[in-house]
Amino acid sequence: MRRTVAYGAIGATVLAAGVLAGVPSSATPEHGRGFGQAALTAFAALPAETFVSASDPSGAALGTNPVNGIVPPFADQPVQGFSGIVRNGDGTFEVLSDNGYGSKANSGDFVLRIHRIAPDFRQGAVDVLGGVNLTDPNRKVPFPLTRPDRVLTGSDFDVESIVRAADGTYWIGDEFGPYLLHFDRAGRLLTAPVPLPGVFAPENPAGTPNLGGSKGYEGLAISPDRRTLYGLLEGTVAGDAAGTLRLNEFDLASGAYTGKRWVYQLDQPNHAIGDLTAVDRDRFLVIERDGGQGVDAKVKKIYLLDKRDRDHDGKLDKVLVADLLNLANPRHVGGFADPFTFPFQTIEDVVILDDRTLAVLNDNNFPFSSGRTPGKPDNNEFITVRLTDRLNADPRVLR
């Protein structure tokens, strides 16, 4: 069923509706031990065929052949591909759409957008409350844009991660540069895109590529004091060890990289990361995943990192927090079996709700991914996960 969002009266978010599984509390696990089996506590979904009402047509470059039963192009723009998330203080969330349809070449009619959503776990639904388009009215982007009105599209940037600064503005991580992009609350670009020194994706016109296509800033975290950004690349820079990803530090006051860098080691070189969020000034949660979906999905994990803690190779140690393919679900939340699996190709959002509860969302790559039901486009699912141990997070993260 095609669902078009009309922004207006929307049901209230009910974050407490999921029934918590009976998992005993304990202190944070000792170094390297890992947490126990996490539990599914709530489930909601936004139908795949959800569109922004009265928006521009989209998907013209996809042709007209059905994809998972969906026939492009579309009369309106899909609300799809949640690639980043920011928690608000009222039970709603800001989520960032992906670049569109997977590449620079086919996403010129997909407008980059921040959506405001509210999960209603009692109804198992996600409401779309509104949002803003990303634009460049003050001509900060130094290269030509797709649209003359300077509304940004998926052919201009591949936006994958988002944080909110202390002044309410947004910083967004891009993969085509990779760039850091600074927007005001209305979605207007405030400064020129900030490149990562010495690193160039193939889509970046400013240098010789040494990073894979769309392998830039998949993860972006902000410190609890809102003074520092941490950007994690999705791909390995040429010349670095196989399966290693650079974690870069950026100072907001000076608007410059500090030169500090850490190394994240993927479990396998063909894995990727999906998101990064701060737990406190030194620790982060990161999603690591393989490229499989459905029965082919083998690795969808959330790890806890500590940038003070490195192994003998200088790489960040990882503690397993949750295996998203093995979540306890004894109460059959959402009508799913026990254990519950989150078997999506791209899982790109994790946010801390309280010291033992995470929200996790997928990027459904509309209309391409079909990890939940073969042959049908994935919905955007919003789940909450209860950990067996406390994170002992900075209280500012929990607000």
Image (cartoon, helix red, strand yellow):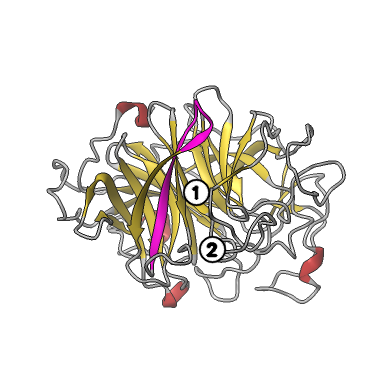
The span from disc 1 to disc 2 (Cα, nearest Å) is 40 Å
Q: Which mark is residue 211?
A: 2
Q: Is residue 101 left or right of residue 211?
A: right
Percent across and percent down for residue 125 are: 54, 47
Q: Quadrant of the C terminus?
A: top left
Residue segment shown in magenta: 243-257
Q: Please report whichever mark, 1 or 2, sits nearer to the chain's N-terminal start.
A: 1
Left-right relation of 383 to 163:
left
Label 2: element kind: loop
Residue occupying the point 60% across, 71% down: 376
SS of the residue under disc 1: loop
| Vertical placement of residue 270 versus 346, above or below | below
Compared with 124, 66 (above or below) is below
State the residue at coordinates (28%, 35%): 393
**Residue at horizontal 20 percent and vertical 56 percent from the top:** 311
Q: Residues within 10 Å of mark 1 (few under 14, many from 20)?
A: many
| Residue 111 vertical position relative to residue 326 in the rendered view, above or below | above
Depth check: 335 or 54 in front?
Answer: 54
Q: Position of residue 287 (x, y in %)?
A: 39, 55
Q: Which of the 4 image quadrants contains residue 113?
A: top right
Mark 1 residue type: Gly
The mark closer to the camera, 1 or 2, is 2
Q: Which residue is mark 1?
A: 124
Residue 226 appears in the picture as rendered: yes
**How many numbered tags mark residues here?**
2
Q: Check if residue 98 falls in the magenta segment.
A: no
Front-lying residue, 170 or 216: 216
